Image (tube, helix red, strand yellow):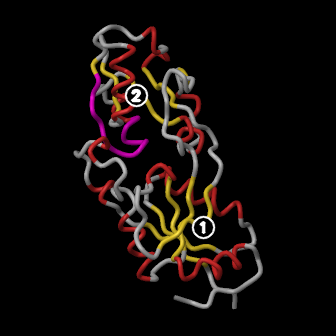
Amino acid sequence: MEKILKIGSRPSALALAQVDEIKALYPRVNFETHVFLTQGDKDKITSISEVDGSDFFTKEIDDALLRGEIDLAVHSSKDLPDILSEGLAVLLETESICPYDALVSKDKRKFAQLPSGLRIGTSSLRRKSTVRLLRPDLRVIDIRGNIGERLALIGSRKIDALIVAFAALIRLGRKELISEVFPLEVFKTHPKQGSLSLMVRHDRWQEVKSILSGQGQATGN
C-alpha cells in the first residue's frame, strides 16, 4: 500500500491554503495534513520586528519533522529562520505568486486619501518605517495575529486600515478587500514574499523527492 506523506502546517486558514497549494503540485501523491501551533501563533503580543530572522513561526513544526512525526513541512519562505535547524533542508521553494504589499481600509480609501491621525495597523518594522516616512501624520498601531484576526481589527474598529501581503489575500480569496496595491519602489517587501518553502529532513531528501516525483515509495521514519 502506498504510504501517505504527512505534511506539517500551522492551523490558520492561510497556512492551510498554502498546504493546498503545495498539494496541487503533486496531484498523484497522497498527503495527510498535521497542524501545529507555533510560538508565533500562541504569542499575540511580541512584535514581529523583535523576532525577525528567528524560528518564531516554524520551530514546533520543524521539531516534529526532525522527530519523524511528519515527512514534510510547509512554511512561508519569509518565515524561515536565517539559520535552519541542523538536519533540515529546503526541498522546494516556489516562485512568488505576488511580491507586493496591499492596503485594506475602511471605505476603500487609498493611502494618500487616508485622513490625518487615522490608525493603520502593521507589526512589520519595514512597513512601520515606510508608513512613518511617507505619512508621518498617521498613527501606526502595532498588531499581531493571523490574517483573519488582523482583518477583524478593522471590523471591530480597533484600527482603520491595514497593510498586508497581497499574496495572503490572493490565497484566501479576499482580493475584493484591497483598497490599493503598492509598487515595490514605494513599499519594499521581503525578497521571498509570496513564496513557499517545502522542508524535509536532510537524511530523507532523496527519498521524499523520489516519492513526490512518482518514482518511489516512502520507507517510514
Which residues lie in the magenta part?
140-151
| Secondary structure found at label 2 | strand
Q: Which mark is residue 57?
A: none
Q: Position of residue 166 (x, y in %)?
A: 55, 35
User: Do the CB atoms of the residues marked 2 and 1 lie less than 8 Å apart?
Assistant: no
Q: CA distance from mark 2 to mark 1?
A: 33 Å
Residue at the spot of label 2: 162
Q: Locate residue 34 relative to residue 4 in the image: left or right.
A: left
Amino acid tagged 2: Leu
Number of residues whose C-alpha sits closer than 10 Å to that of mark 2, classed few (under 14), some (14–19) or many (20 or more): many
Q: Residue at x 57, y 23 (%)?
A: 183
Amino acid tagged 1: Leu
Magenta stretch: includes residue 148: yes
Q: Locate residue 42 relative to residue 187 in the image: left or right.
A: left
Magenta stretch: includes residue 129: no
Q: Position of residue 56 (x, y in %)?
A: 33, 56
- Lower sequence index among marks 2 and 1: 1
Residue at the spot of label 1: 91
Q: Position of residue 170 (x, y in %)?
A: 59, 39
Number of residues whose C-alpha sits closer than 10 Å to that of mark 1, classed few (under 14), some (14–19) or many (20 or more): some
| Secondary structure found at label 1 | strand
Q: Residue at x 62, y 81 (%)?
A: 4
The answer to which of 174 and 188 lies nearer the viewer is 188
The answer to which of 170 and 219 lies nearer the viewer is 219
